[in-house]
Image (cartoon, grey):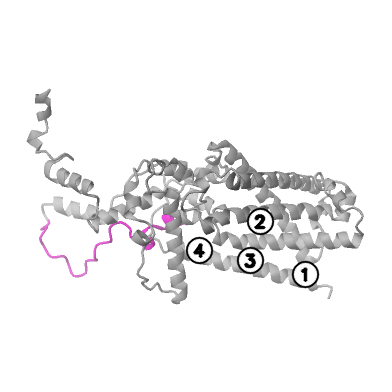
């Protein structure tokens, strides 16, 4: 019976990490549903972007209040959870604060953890007030209903409870408090439990200890179902982020090949294609499988902070477009495709749906001004514009479904060499009227 808690702890730990690993495997499979894209260039710049943007939070602090609070929560939460390593060793071996044998440095680190726990707790409360009392506009857009809205609050409650459990665990640990070192905050919480017997304090301390580690494992597994997946994906997303100028269109290989054939005098443009010629690739994207894997990684990384939408001129002038919704819709459709594959034993069966039309409307796509403000505003290098452009490309090149004004302009360019409906010979007539 002595080893029962250790065995129970091992079961909880293996279950928690095992379920997380299963979902990570599913996440990687879904991202790989996207088309391949070469992002092996300029590795030094990619590492720099990851260090500056994901680790250094350089784009977060452009909005100082939210940025500084986020840095506190991010740094505090990551550093405090280093203590999880000690909890795991104690849980498996049956020891108690095994790293305390280090002596003074250990207690200095615990002091830092306790200070950070309070700062994280205060920051999270301010975040909650901004979201629910002040009601910042970007958190109350049309797409932020039901789950997206609740998800933001759930994670704040999670963090509050975990920080409280950490401090209560320290405050009721009589052995730790008797050293009177490393308890810079918890020493002021200890009096809340004065008058309780040592056995009751031990029970509270053990309960807080168990709830703390179980809470961390639940939090870990919650990430897959939450916008907080960005805690993990912000690093690869910033590394693989676009390095070419924002909004730059990529050349389609099939189109390039066609143009070269047209300009080659040695090739008969009317010749029948060879039998082994591959069918031309689809132009643009109508569903998530037509996007590349970096764009799908973007969708899973979206923090739903709404900075992109709050900077979008189309959204600000009342248009239907919200870059945040573009990313949320892409992620939701990708999840739907993933569940379809799970249900059909690894094969996707046509469900009669697609990203274009069922999730994202043409009205949203054509409202975009392609100004790249959304890309610039994103704190983790997400590129909603690239998805919008690929879907527009599909509408124009596969469906001939561009707006009338755009079709007229393209016809004019084709016939007149200019976007205006005038013959080339008449284009300078205006000067004669001056």
Tell me the tag on residue 27: 4
Residue segment shown in magenta:
267-296
Q: CA distance from mark 3 to mark 2?
A: 18 Å
Question: Circle 2 is placed at which residue position?
Answer: 158
4 or 1: tag closer to the N-terminus? 1
Question: Circle 1 is placed at which residue position?
Answer: 6
Which residue is situated farthest in the front direction here?
133
> Which SS type dominates the magenta stretch?
loop
Residue at point 63%, 52% (across, down): 156
Residue 131 rendering spot, x and y as whole percentages = 58, 47
Answer above or below: position of 344 versus 20: below
Q: Quadrant of the C terminus?
A: top left
Residue at point 88%, 55% (across, down): 175
Tell me the tag on residue 17: 3
4 or 2: tag closer to the N-terminus? 4
Residue 205 rendering spot, x and y as whole percentages = 82, 59
Residue 270 inside the magenta-drawn segment: yes
Q: Quadrant of residue 369?
A: top left
1 or 2: tag closer to the N-terminus? 1
The answer to whether the residue labelled 3 contacts the one labelled 4, judged by CB atoms less than 8 Å apart, is no
């Amino acid at each position: 019976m002595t080893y029962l808690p250790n065995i129970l702890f091992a079961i909880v730990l293996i279950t928690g990490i095992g379920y997380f690993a299963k979902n990570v495997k599913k996440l990687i499979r879904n991202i790989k549903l996207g088309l391949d894209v070469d992002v092996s260039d300029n590795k030094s710049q990619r590492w720099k972007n990851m260090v500056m943007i994901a680790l250094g939070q350089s784009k977060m602090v452009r909005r100082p209040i939210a940025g500084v609070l986020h840095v506190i929560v991010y740094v505090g939460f990551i550093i405090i959870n280093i203590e999880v390593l000690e909890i795991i060793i104690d849980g498996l071996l049956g020891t108690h604060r095994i790293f305390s044998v280090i002596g003074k440095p250990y207690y200095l680190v615990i002091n830092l953890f306790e200070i950070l726990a309070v700062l994280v707790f205060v920051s999270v409360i301010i975040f909650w007030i901004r979201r629910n009392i002040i009601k910042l506009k970007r958190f109350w857009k049309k797409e932020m209903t039901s789950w997206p809205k609740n998800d933001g609050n759930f994670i704040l409650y999670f963090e509050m409870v975990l920080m409280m459990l950490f401090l209560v665990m320290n405050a009721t640990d009589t052995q730790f408090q008797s050293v009177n070192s490393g308890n810079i905050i918890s020493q002021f919480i200890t009096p809340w439990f004065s008058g309780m017997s040592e056995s009751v304090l031990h029970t509270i301390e053990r309960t807080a200890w168990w709830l703390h580690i179980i809470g961390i494992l639940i939090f870990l597994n919650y990430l897959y179902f939450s916008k907080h997946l960005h805690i993990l994906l912000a690093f690869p997303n910033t590394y693989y982020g676009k390095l070419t100028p924002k909004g730059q269109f990529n050349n389609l290989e099939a189109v390039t090949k066609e143009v070269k054939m047209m300009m080659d005098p040695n090739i008969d443009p009317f010749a029948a294609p060879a039998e082994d010629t591959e069918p031309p690739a689809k132009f643009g994207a109508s569903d998530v499988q037509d996007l590349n894997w970096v764009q799908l990684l973007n969708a899973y990384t979206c923090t739903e902070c709404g900075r992109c939408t709050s900077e979008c001129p189309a959204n600000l002038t009342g248009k239907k477009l919200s870059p945040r919704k573009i990313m949320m819709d892409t992620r939701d459709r990708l999840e739907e495709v993933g569940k379809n594959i799970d249900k059909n034993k690894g094969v996707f069966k046509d469900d009669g749906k697609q990203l274009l039309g069922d999730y994202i409307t043409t009205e949203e796509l054509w409202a975009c001004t392609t100004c790249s403000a959304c890309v610039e505003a994103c704190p983790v290098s997400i590129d909603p514009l690239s998805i919008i452009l690929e879907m527009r490309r599909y509408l124009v090149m596969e469906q001939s479904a561009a707006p009338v004004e755009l079709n007229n302009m393209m016809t004019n360019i084709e016939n007149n060499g200019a976007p205006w409906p005038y013959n080339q010979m008449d284009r300078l007539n205006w000067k004669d009227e001056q």
